[in-house]
Image: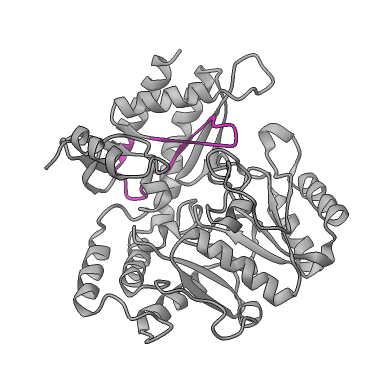
Amino acid sequence: MPSSAELHDRRRAAVAPGVSSVIDAYVAHASGGTLTDVDGREWIDFAAGIAVTNVGNAAPRVVEAVRAQVEKFTHTCFMVAPYSLYVDVCEQLNALTPGTFEKRSALFNSGAEAVENAVKIARHATGRPAIVVFEHAYHGRTNLTMALTAKNMPYKHRFGPFAGEIYRVPMSYPLRDRLDGPAAAARAVDLIEKQVGAANVAAVIIEPIQGEGGFVVPAPGFVSGLHTWASGAGVVFVADEIQTGFCRTGDWFASTFEGVEPDLVTTAKGLAGGLPLAGVTGRATIMDAVHAGGLGGTYGGNPIACAAALASIETMRELSLADAARAIEAAMMPRLRSLAARDPRIAEVRGRGAMLAVEIVTPGTALTPDPATAAAVSAACHRAGLLTLTCGTYGNVLRFLPPLVIPEDTMDRGLHILESAFTSVR
């Protein structure tokens, strides 16, 4: 097998440079909480493919289900010749997402596709044009979802012009705005009503915990306050649970923590154990508004991905992975808080379940972001064999997304590497 160095040389000649990678090592196999590269080096995985391999890499049930389905058929296009697996996944999504009302689902390929279709559905159902999103939001890389996404570099820079009728309001960011949830919600609603007009708004789209924007956990009462306003204004409330979903935050979905029942929920990432599958699930009255043929796509709900999703959901139930996420939080949070107490560069430790982060600033300043230190600490982790990711509007947040099946001793080794990385970067 070629070495990572050889593969990297080939990559430079074959792959567009706009597609970047966090590390230059090339993976040969992975399982549980580790990756092994082609040179035989083991990496502790605190990334999970950006919250995708919640059930672990090559999870046994997923592998078995995929293998069995490949031997039957690989594709017919559900819009041409349907199959039961698509229906099975939709039934699971309807049952698992928050809300006891009657629901429908539609399947797609990626999180961006799911969000884009949620916008289509909301506009069609309401007859209104405007979409409200939030500062620091990330919703995808298509033209429409780039418009929804807040951060310019690298996601939006020189890719415009973007889709219209998108309006951005402040997010609850407790570390930086010092507002409680109801006050932050009132601020956002006031801007919506004054600058957009409630009667023009088709949907409000929010990540219950922001992902790429910095793992920002809104203050209690913010999400529920927005939901209450949206319900009264006839606005479709869309929870983007693409990164938070499927046990990642200690429950099946993060909306549950504020008692919110979204009108529409978008899912992807952790749904299918590493295969590309996404969904929009929501109130039947809203989902049923779209005419036949208005939703779909050639590969949406591919049978192999659906088989993987059913096996992944079964694994989540069997292994109680929501409980596992809470156990990861219970193990990691004290270590991260202890590290923060010793290192004044860490302004905040935040997150929920196995979706945790530290925000890094310049000590002695008014929370001045320090992306250079965040990048240096992450690079030190990589050199020591721990795969970590940075994020945030300012690039100054280290985020931690271990697979929910990571062994405790592997997680402990990863935390030791992280602590040493902070010590080595001065």
Q: Quadrant of the N terminus?
A: top left
Which stretch did the figure color magenta?
388-412
Q: Nearer the viewer, residue 246 or 144?
A: 144
Taking 265 as reference, is 183 above or below it? above
Furthest toward the left, the residue is 1
Determine which quarter of the picture holds residue 308: bottom left
Q: Residue at x 43, y 65 (%)?
A: 109
Give the image location of residue 79, x and y in percent: 43, 83
Determine which quarter of the picture holds residue 277: bottom left
Q: Residue at x 60, y 40 (%)?
A: 152
Give the number of marks.
0
Give the image location of residue 314, x and y in percent: 34, 67
Taking 212 as reference, is 243 above or below it? below
Q: Nearer the viewer, residue 376 or 231?
A: 376
Q: Is residue 394 magenta-colored? A: yes
Give the side of residue 53 with respect to residue 132, left or right: left
Give the side of residue 229 with respect to residue 376, left or right: right
